[in-house]
Image (cartoon, helix red, strand yellow):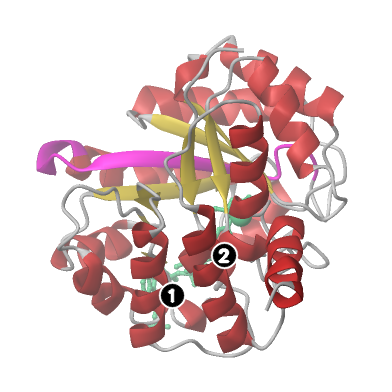
Amino acid sequence: MRDGVHIVEVGPRDGLQNEKTPISVADRIAFIEALIGAGLHTVEVGAFVSPKAIPQMVGSAEVLRGVSHHTNRELPVLVPNEKGYEASQAAGAKLIAVFAAASESFSRANINCSIAESIERFKPVLARARADGVRVRGYISTVLGCPHEGEIKPQAVVDVAKVLWDLGCYEISLGDTIGVGTPLKARQLLRAVAGHVPMANLAMHFHDTYGQALANLYAGMEEGCRVIDSAAGGLGGCPYAPGATGNVATEDVVYMLEGMGIATGVDMAKLVAATNVVSGLIGRPPVSRVAAALNAKARATK
Ligand code: HMG
Ligand code: MG
């Protein structure tokens, strides 16, 4: 495998969007600062979505403004429509992400429209972003399974990926929203999508419900994929994906990559410290195996 993997930290957005305990704007900013301080280059900081749908992301404008002095970092935010785009621009977003799905029922549950309608909503967003010099990432959810429809065929993902790519998304992030994928399926999916979108422009966004995420990432890396979405502490979930757990943990990804001789630029001790802070705020220990191991080691050596 060649060197060089880019980590997209999604903890402050995906990680917190499903938490019952509301986390204040100040605490979200402190969490992001800690992640940036640990060496993460790209940190998804919030979402300009309906406050009725996701109250946890209220205050994303203040969060973005609070961290935007980090001009040498990428600080993406989620945008579902033109209203969200306008709010993101008022807050100064330079990088946004639109989010579609590979299954109709998840699209309906998550953003209250069909896949085709969601694409129609994204078109003016992408056109305006292009005119404004704003980069756009495209997510596709349920790429390896849907909570309502079960198995999803790679072709369904390819169809959406092609459209997002043709509309001008610079990267397509493939979301195993409910974490049901296995390495073989992850590999087959990446091969299928890479037939239409360059592998260099694909990202893996794997939730870890069935404990397969790290293995799936490894399989995807063997296929040549070099962008990994992860969340500190293994935080995460989507309110519209019942039963799904968090994203693959950034600590676990960093540990695996460093162990493979792939430098991440992330300081593990600082990353675990950031995770511990947020875990104190939500009142649960991190599910990350690496964070748990390092915390246990630190306690034992005290
Ligand atoms: P809708 O109800 O169809 O929208 O929701 P609408 O246009 O009819 O508007 C309804 C109300 O929402 C109106 O307010 C609008 O102003 C307001 P009211 O008149 O009722 O007071 N509204 C907005 N407010 C703030 N920001 C906006 C916005 N748009 C409308 N941008 C909508 C459609 C898409 C807005 C809604 O369903 C929504 O916000 N959904 C968000 C869902 C979400 O954030 N899900 C989690 C992120 S996706 C994810 O986690 C998956 C991912 O991690 C990858 C993976 O793991 O698979 C990315
Ligand atoms: Mg997700």
Task: Kindly give the residue lying farthest to the front in the view shown.
Answer: 301
Q: Position of residue 128 (x, y in %)?
A: 18, 44
Q: How many marks?
A: 2
Q: Nearer the viewer, residue 34 or 166?
A: 34
Secondary structure of the residue carrying numbered label 1: loop
Q: Which label is found at residue 50?
A: 1
The reply to whether residue 236 is in sight is no
Q: Nearer the viewer, residue 199 or 87?
A: 199
* Residue in the image at 27% along x and 44% along y: 124
Magenta stretch contains residue 16: no
Q: Position of residue 266 (x, y in %)?
A: 45, 47
Q: Amino acid at mark 2?
A: Val
Check whether the beta carbons of the residues at disc 1 and disc 2 lie within 8 A of each other: no
> Magenta residues?
130-145
Q: Which label is found at residue 272?
A: 2
Q: Position of residue 97 (x, y in %)?
A: 39, 48
Secondary structure of the residue carrying numbered label 2: helix
- In the shown orientation, is residue 194 left or right of residue 293? left
Where, quadrant-wise, is the C terminus in this rendering? bottom right
Q: Does the numbered disc 1 mark a residue whose Cβ is under 8 Å from ligand 1?
A: yes
